[in-house]
């Protein structure tokens, strides 16, 4: 189930990005930086009091050379369409401005919860200034300071309280997958080609993302798949077509709900920075990943073309070394029939469990061939390893001191586990804990 979405909206210079970064810093579980993953400030995963949610910083959405009023209008429109809760941010230092009133008039059009937050209330004297903002018509203003963190807890409480109630859903046992990628890589063509490739469509189901339709289909070996729409594939309009960053918002919702994510590249255009943005989110989310190179039919090829392209992918996506690569054409259906079987295999690896006894045999053999490192005369000791989760496979390694586990030795153990078991297509997580 996709996490609820919060959008921060307001005119320029009210501190949207400061509040965005402040709330993102409240996360309980922080994903470590991974070399090669390009991050985009427009989006963050956050958590407050056990409630996980996603955030959009509309100030990071660049509409191009559009006039000022057009920019804030289109950014607010994105928030209205994509968010579950909207934070309307204003500034205590400037008071109510004409631009604030313009944003307010746009937000009157939505029936979604709007929370009015007054930023830059950095001292008690400024609290008296917030009452003017009642005139905007969104109820009690919430005083906050993005710089000092004042009031962010109260704001987060109100945000979580405003989230829509999620109905319990029956666990879907089908293999859920999606195509993600920047605009014009051929996601829509792949969807249509897959469904036209001798597949029996079982049903179309409304997704948890607005305007998304998930499609169930069965392959010849009776495997049931659910293809998740990337949220907005049918939407038209300049605001969506003028910013590649919006493709990230489409992809994030699909990633949350997928078991396996197909990262689509355009063979004609090669690898772009935006491809790394989108793939990085799927990797951080711990989903199974397949790299799909579409439009392969358009290239002039020799005996080395495929290998050279594969080497380029491995160089640019070093953190996805585990992901299989498939070269396809939605237009000619080249190798497309092989994709469902590959998705099925990656999903099986994503939920694979390894018995503790077998796992420890592999880990101890690895240590025997490559002894643990020492630091200041103290040697790392590995006592025991066990798998604690799937999707992705997660292993806890009990040691004498987690600080002694150098990242290079952790990578060595991961490689040994991958060599012993089939984890192609899925990240695996290793967690070091001190043995009590």
Image: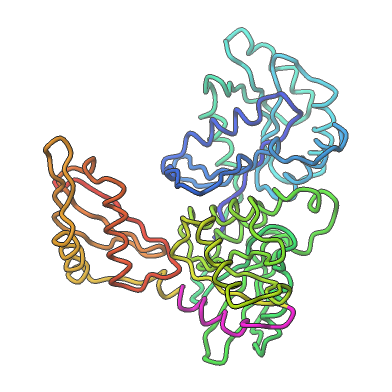
Tell me, yes or no, whether the highlighted magenta stretch contains residue 412.
no
Where is 98 relative to 48, above or below? above
Q: Position of residue 102 (x, y in %)?
A: 85, 31
Where is 70 relative to 343, above or below? above
Q: Position of residue 129 (x, y in %)?
A: 69, 13
Relative placement, left or right, of 62 versus 50 is right
Q: Position of residue 325 (x, y in %)?
A: 53, 71
Q: Quadrant of residue 113?
A: top right
Residue range in magenta is 331-346
* Location of the N terminus (image quadrant): bottom right
Q: Residue at x 42, y 70 (%)?
A: 424
Q: Residue at x 71, y 77 (%)?
A: 297
Relative depth, front residue between 183 and 158: 183
Where is 140 relative to 199, above or below? above
Tell me, yes or no, whether the highlighted magenta stretch contains residue 341.
yes
> Is most of the magenta stretch helix, strand or loop?
helix
Relative depth, front residue between 253 and 103: 253
Relative depth, front residue between 255 and 319: 319
* Count of numbered circles in the view: 0
Q: Residue at x 52, y 91 (%)?
A: 221
Where is 340 relative to 395, above or below? below
Relative placement, left or right, of 200 versus 287 is right
Q: Position of residue 47 (x, y in %)?
A: 48, 42
Relative placement, left or right, of 352 versus 49 is left
Q: Residue furthest bottom?
A: 220
Colour mapping used in the image: rainbow
Q: Residue furthest top?
A: 125
């Amino acid at each position: 189930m996709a996490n609820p979405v919060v959008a921060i909206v307001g005119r320029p210079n009210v501190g949207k990005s400061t509040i965005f970064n402040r709330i993102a810093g409240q996360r309980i579980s922080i994903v470590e930086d991974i070399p090669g993953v390009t991050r985009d400030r427009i989006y963050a995963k956050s958590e407050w009091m056990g409630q996980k949610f996603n955030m959009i910083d509309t100030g990071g959405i660049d509409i191009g050379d559009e006039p000022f009023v057009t920019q804030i209008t289109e950014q607010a429109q994105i928030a209205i369409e994509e968010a579950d809760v909207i934070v309307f941010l204003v500034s205590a230092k400037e008071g109510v401005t004409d631009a604030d009133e313009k944003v307010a008039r746009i937000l009157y059009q939505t029936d979604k919860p709007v929370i009015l937050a007054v930023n830059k209330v950095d001292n008690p004297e400024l609290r008296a200034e917030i009452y003017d903002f009642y005139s905007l018509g969104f109820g009690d203003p919430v005083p906050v300071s993005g710089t000092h963190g004042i009031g962010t807890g109260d704001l987060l409480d109100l945000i979580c309280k405003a989230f829509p109630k999620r109905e319990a859903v029956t666990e879907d046992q089908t293999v859920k997958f999606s195509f993600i990628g920047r605009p014009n890589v051929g996601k829509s063509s792949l969807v249509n080609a897959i469904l036209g490739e001798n597949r029996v469509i079982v049903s179309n189901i409304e997704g948890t993302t607005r305007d998304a339709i998930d499609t169930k289909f069965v392959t010849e070996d009776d495997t049931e798949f659910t293809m998740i729409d990337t949220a907005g594939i049918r939407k038209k309009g300049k605001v969506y077509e003028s910013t590649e960053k919006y493709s990230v918002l489409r992809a994030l919702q699909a990633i949350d709900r997928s078991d396996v994510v197909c990262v689509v590249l355009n063979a004609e255009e090669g690898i772009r920075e935006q491809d790394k943005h989108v793939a990085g989110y799927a990797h951080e989310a711990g989903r199974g990943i397949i790299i799909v190179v579409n439009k392969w039919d358009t290239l002039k090829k020799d005996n080395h073309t495929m290998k050279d392209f594969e080497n380029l992918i491995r160089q640019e996506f070093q953190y996805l070394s585990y992901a299989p690569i498939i070269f396809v054409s939605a237009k000619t259906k080249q190798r497309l029939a092989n994709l469902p079987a590959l998705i099925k295999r990656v999903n099986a690896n994503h939920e694979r469990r390894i018995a503790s006894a077998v796992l420890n045999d592999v880990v101890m053999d690895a240590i025997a061939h490559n002894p643990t490192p020492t630091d200041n005369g103290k040697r790392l000791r590995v006592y025991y390893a066990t798998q604690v989760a799937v999707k992705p496979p997660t292993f806890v390694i009990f040691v004498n001191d987690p600080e002694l586990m150098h990242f290079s030795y952790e990578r060595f153990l991961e490689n040994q586990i991958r060599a012993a078991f089939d984890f192609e297509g899925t990240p695996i997580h290793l967690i070091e804990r001190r043995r009590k």
